[in-house]
Image (spheres, helix red, strand yellow):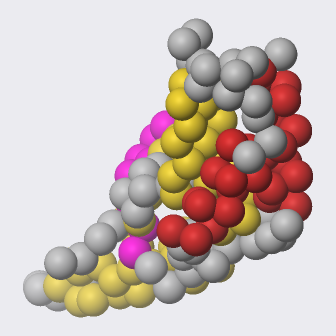
Amino acid sequence: MLKENVKKLLDEGLEQDESLFLIDFTVSPDNGIKVIIDGDNGVTVEDCIRISRAIEHNLDRDAVDFSLEVASAGATAPMVMPRQYKKNIGRKLEVETLESKYEGKLTEANAEHIVLEWKAREPKPIGKGKVTVQKRKTLNFSEITKAKVVLKF
């Protein structure tokens, strides 16, 4: 019952800002509510507060004792929805498939696939030495087992 009420309130809160979307939502046996959100333009502290208030201010603490945590998806958390890739165009990603692992700049993202580009050193076709070549790989979402942003410090 609590989970259904919270989900309804959460959906109503997210409808207030169409750039925000749900990544994960759980209610533990001891009524610990945890909400993870992301946004097309990122997530601010104010966004988390607004979603928290949309839930908390509409639940009766006298009827149900609960704890509530609303957070944004972490910068290094794996991406789980195609929508998350669009905001990361231009960033370096590490993407795993069943067959291989790729690291490159995300240059395209749509509803079906992403495109990664990177430079690689390969042996010259003729003669000794190596040459730098531009590589490009299109990966369908169905192929991707894990993907995350690579942060540079």
- Name the foreground residue: 108 vs 42: 42
Give the residue displayed 64% in from the left and 51% down from the top. Answer: 52
Is 100 part of what is drawn in magenta?
yes
Asked if 152 appears above or below 95 in the picture, the reply is below
Quadrant in the picture for the C terminus: bottom left
- Name the foreground residue: 66 vs 42: 66
On the image, the x and y values in percent for residue 40 come to 68, 73
Asked if 122 appears above or below 57 in the picture, the reply is below
Give the residue displayed 58% in from the left and 71% down from the top. Answer: 46
Give the residue displayed 80% in from the left and 42% down from the top. Answer: 58
Is 103 part of what is drawn in magenta?
no
Q: Is residue 116 left or right of residue 6?
A: left
Quadrant in the picture for the N terminus: top right
Asked if 140 appears above or below 31 in the picture, the reply is below
Question: Which quadrant holds residue 89?
Answer: bottom right
- How many numbered circles does the render carry? 0
State whether residue 81 appears in this view: no
**Of helix, strand and loop, which mostly describes the magenta segment?**
strand
Q: Give the magenta part as a residue range.
A: 92-101
Q: Is residue 66 left or right of residue 117?
A: right
Give the residue displayed 84% in from the left and 25% down from the top. Answer: 4
